């Protein structure tokens, strides 16, 4: 069985990844070590900088994700964590007051380092910002995100999230890559 470390402080992210990757024969362990996160304009740059600066672990991945709201020109995007911890879900809903276009998407960027080589995998899910906070499963922005083609938030339908989320799509690409590599 393949063994990798997932360096993250976020237990929810870890558990989502573990559930998915176990099915693909990849065993992961969480490392809660902090790593440098630069303030960049996109998640790719954040991940690339971080992974290049982790030198004391091998065979690991990191993952950075964010919610991008189109009418707010991509806000909170790379600031997702800070915004969640400050104005929170209520604050986002207030910012969206009176705005008709509620389109948004989640992006996940994974940086994998194996045998000292770096590989990047991405996933994206399109959807809408709900009118109110709904559901108690999931974490972060899940209670205000409705994927396109559905009418429940990720926090109301967590099984659906596991099937179609940005993270699942990025993890799937990584799993396929690892299989080809016969790592
Ligand atoms: P690490 O950097 O330690 O991995 P983190 O919690 O900082 O953990 P991110 O930077 O990837 O993780 O997340 C940025 C913010 O977006 C944070 O507030 C999360 O709660 C939120 N978020 C990330 N993935 C999410 C998801 O699948 N559903 C809802 N919110 C999510």
Image (cartoon, rainbow, N blue to C red):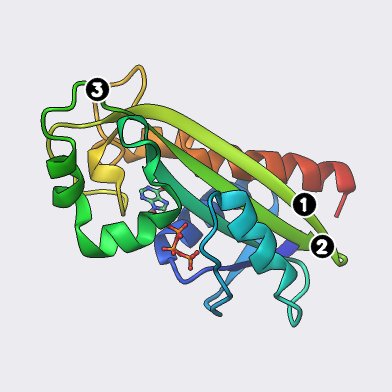
C-alpha separation, residue under disc 1 versus residue under disc 3: 35 Å
Tell me if 114 is positioned left or right of 174 in this view: right
Residues at circles 3 and 2 in contact by the CB criterion of under 8 Å: no
- Badge number at residue 151: 3
Residues at circles 1 and 3 in contact by the CB criterion of under 8 Å: no
Say which residue appears at 77% left-offset and 67% top-offset: 59
Say which residue appears at 18% left-offset and 27% top-offset: 99
Q: Quadrant of the N terminus?
A: bottom right
Q: Is residue 129 above or below residue 82?
A: above
Structural crowding at the residue carrying mark 1, measured as other residues with C-alpha within 10 Å and reported as few (<14), some (14–19) or many (≥20): some
Tag 2 residue: 114
Residues at circles 2 and 1 in contact by the CB criterion of under 8 Å: yes
C-alpha separation, residue under disc 3 versus residue under disc 2: 39 Å
What kind of element bears circle 2?
A: strand
Mark earlier in primary sequence (1, 3): 1
Tell me if 44 is positioned left or right of 106 in this view: right
Tag 1 residue: 119
Q: Which residue is more in the foreground, 81 or 15?
A: 81
Judged from the image, the quadrant occupied by ligand 1 is bottom left
Structural crowding at the residue carrying mark 3, measured as other residues with C-alpha within 10 Å and reported as few (<14), some (14–19) or many (≥20): some
What kind of element bears circle 3?
A: loop
């Amino acid at each position: 069985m393949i063994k990798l470390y997932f360096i993250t402080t976020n237990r929810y992210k870890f558990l989502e990844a573990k559930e998915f990757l176990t099915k693909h024969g990849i065993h992961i362990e969480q490392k809660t070590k902090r790593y440098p996160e630069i303030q960049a304009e996109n998640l790719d740059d954040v991940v690339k900088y971080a992974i290049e600066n982790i030198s004391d672990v091998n065979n690991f991945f990191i993952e950075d994700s964010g919610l991008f709201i189109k009418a707010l020109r991509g806000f909170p995007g790379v600031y997702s964590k800070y915004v969640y911890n400050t104005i929170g879900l209520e604050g986002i809903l207030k910012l969206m007051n009176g705005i008709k276009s509620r389109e948004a998407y989640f992006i996940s960027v994974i940086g994998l380092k194996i045998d000292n080589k770096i590989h990047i995998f991405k996933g994206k899910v399109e959807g809408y910002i709900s009118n109110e906070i709904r559901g108690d499963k999931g974490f972060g922005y899940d209670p205000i995100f409705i994927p396109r083609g559905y009418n429940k938030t990720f926090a109301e339908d967590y099984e659906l999230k596991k099937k179609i989320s940005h993270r699942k799509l990025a993890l799937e690409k990584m799993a396929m890559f690892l299989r080809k590599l016969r790592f």
